[in-house]
Amino acid sequence: MVKRTSLKGDYCPSARSLDVIGDWWSLLIVRDAFDGLTRFGEFQKSLGIAKNILSDRLRTLSERGILKVVPSSDGGAHQEYHLTPKGRDLFPVMVALRQWGERYLFEPGEEHSRLVERDTGQAIRLDIRTVDGRPVSPDQAVILKVPQQEALQPRAAERLQKSSRKRS
Amino acid sequence: MVKRTSLKGDYCPSARSLDVIGDWWSLLIVRDAFDGLTRFGEFQKSLGIAKNILSDRLRTLSERGILKVVPSSDGGAHQEYHLTPKGRDLFPVMVALRQWGERYLFEPGEEHSRLVERDTGQAIRLDIRTVDGRPVSPDQAVILKVPQQEALQPRAAERLQKSSRKRS
DNA sequence: TCAAACGGTTTCATAATGCAACCGATTCTG
DNA sequence: CAGAATCGGTTGCATTATGAAACCGTTTGA
């Protein structure tokens, strides 16, 4: 392996995200953290992960600001792992993965856990929209590489020039 | 390793998704496919991935119905790898990862690629909503494990009984 | 107060990954 | 149309990551 490829410097935000949380266990730990798990043993039992690996991942996730280590809330001497705001902001990623999995990886009629609004029990979904709230179909979405911005309708590209100038 | 843990049977859709696309390279390949790449050499150059690994991943992604192998569109003898509808439906996952990365993994002012609506150049974002369109804050979201459904307001739990009965 | 459980770390075996060399089929060049 | 270069892989070997089990000091429970 020599050294696993790092995408830290990639211009693409998705790639950098995968660099941070794209390994086999990290997102599963985050999922369990969303589920309310906080302690080493809880994660270990839930995931069936080897203890040395879990130890390493918890440390890494903490170093990267996704989890934080806090003294036990119930007065005990052990510590707990809690999601930080940065970690909690991974929520849409979890929802997106869940939605795809529900659709493609379950037999019709097969039971699965469900994500709902607490007060109403209503199912929760993801929407792709423009910043001003209009729904967008995926084929209307294009990725603008930096610094080029071809692949746009000329009109749209012009409009973009103005707003992007201040970024550089 | 004995055998890498499989989550195929997990009740949680996120876990099953990670089982299918949660490895180091698969989502990066999918990202490039969204970017319009179709050929072996294009992926290889873009990602800097070892050829044997790329070969393996392309095969696996095809077996799993995320890519499909098609004869070259430009009449050539080589084949191309295209996203299937199942693969295209990973779009929200990519957007969610991108959004998180933009927020937390770039210095202020640092350039990154951008996701916009083709016709207008407007930035694209993700929204979390209930099925009937109301926005939901993440702390209002709970995961109902199957088959239990505690952790809900009693009223909501009742309502849920009716709709879930037909699933089992 | 003694035993169990918790929260790890260390050691060792194995699986996954990366690199480089190789190879046949295709495509480009003169 | 011949020869060279490129494409699209496969194979073999070295290195890294992962997993299971043993171990160990600390904390908790009876």
Image (cartoon, coloured by chain):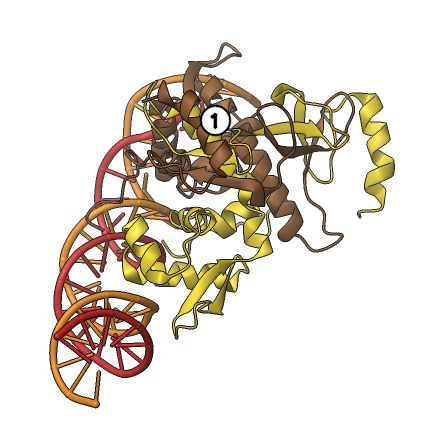
Chain colours: A brown, B yellow, C red, D orange
Instruction: Using the image as rendered, state which of residue B44 and residue B115 is in the foreground.
Output: B115
Asked if residue A155 is positioned above or below residue B32 in the image, the reply reads above
Is residue A88 among what the camera can see? yes
**How far across and how far down the image is residue A124, in percent?**
69, 32
Asked if residue A140 is positioned above or below residue A127 in the image, the reply reads below
Instruction: Using the image as rendered, state which of residue B2 and residue D16 is in the foreground.
Output: D16
- Quarter residue D24 falls in: top left
**How far across and how far down the image is residue A99, in percent?**
63, 41
The residue where tag 1 is placed is A159
Q: Which residue is drawn at 57% across and 45% down?
A: A139
- Quarter residue A16 falls in: top left
Q: In this view, does A146 lie to the left or right of A2?
A: right
Q: Residue at x 49, y 59 (%)?
A: B82
Name the chain letter of the residue that bears numbered label 1. Answer: A
Badge 1 marks a residue whose secondary structure is helix
Q: Which residue is drawn at 36% across and 30% down?
A: B112
Task: In the displayed orientation, state which residue is furthest to the top.
Answer: A75
Q: Which amino acid does label 1 sit on?
A: Arg
Instruction: Using the image as rendered, state which of residue B80 and residue A27 is in the foreground.
Output: B80
**How far across and how far down the image is residue B8, in percent?**
56, 53
Asked if residue A73 is positioned above or below residue B113 in the image, the reply reads above
Asked if residue B111 is positioned above or below residue D27 in the image, the reply reads below
* Number of other residues with Cα within 10 Å of mark 1, as a class: few under 14, some 14 to 19, many 20 or more: few
Q: Which residue is drawn at 64% across and 33% down?
A: A127
**How far across and how far down the image is residue D16, in percent?**
23, 46
